[in-house]
Each structure stands twice: as C-alpha cells, then as structure tokens.
Image: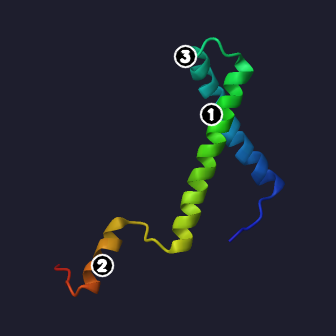
Amino acid sequence: MKVFATRFDIFTYGIQIRAPSLLATAGIKFFARSLTFWQAFIISVFSFTISTLLIAVYFFVKASMGVPYQTGILITQRAQAYGIKKSG
C-alpha cells in the first residue's frame, strides 16, 4: 500500500480536480451571471476539492473498519451469527 503521494500523483489529482472545475465554472457562470469567471472558478475548485476529499475519507474509513464491499455479505454474516443457514 502506497502511503505517500509522488509529485506525479499530486499533479494527476490536481488535473482531475481542475478539469471538471472548468465545466462547473461554466454552469455556475450561467446561473450566477453577476460573478466573474475567477469567482465561479474558485467556487467550483473548492467544491470539487472538498467532495474529492470527502469521498477519499469515506473509502479510507470504510477500508480501515473492515466493512465488506457488498451489503449481501454483511447480511449473510449477521444471519450466520444468529444460526440461520442459507439454503441453496
């Protein structure tokens, strides 16, 4: 498991955040015409950065807690704990 990001990883993540931000900037500019392009761009960059961080934290916490990938596995494990056998 890679713990530290390299310069290339940081550059790639930056591109992944900035590229959709340009499209979001156009949408923000369309609905809030009083904003300048740079104000709309900063809003979209912050929103994409925060949402990306929240998704990363979610998957990191999920992996560290050992939550199964599929909910069906979790339900089967709970059923087996109560002595319920799966048929078929």
Q: Residue at x 62, y 37 (%)?
A: 47
- Which of pointers 2 and 1 lies earlier in the amino acid sequence? 1
- Which of pointers 3 and 1 lies earlier in the amino acid sequence? 1
Q: Position of residue 17 (x, y in %)?
A: 67, 40
Residue at disc 2, secondary structure: helix
Image mark for residue 85? none
Tell me: 61 left or right of 81. right
| Residue situated furthest top in the rendering | 34
Residue 63 occupies quadrant: bottom right
Amino acid type, label 2: Arg
Colouring = rainbow
CA gap, disc 3 and disc 1: 17 Å
Amino acid type, label 1: Pro
Q: Which residue is mark 3?
A: 31
Q: Residue at x 68, y 35 (%)?
A: 45
Q: Position of residue 77 (x, y in %)?
A: 32, 79
Mark in the foreground, 3 or 1: 3
Image mark for residue 20? 1
- Which of pointers 3 and 2 lies earlier in the amino acid sequence? 3
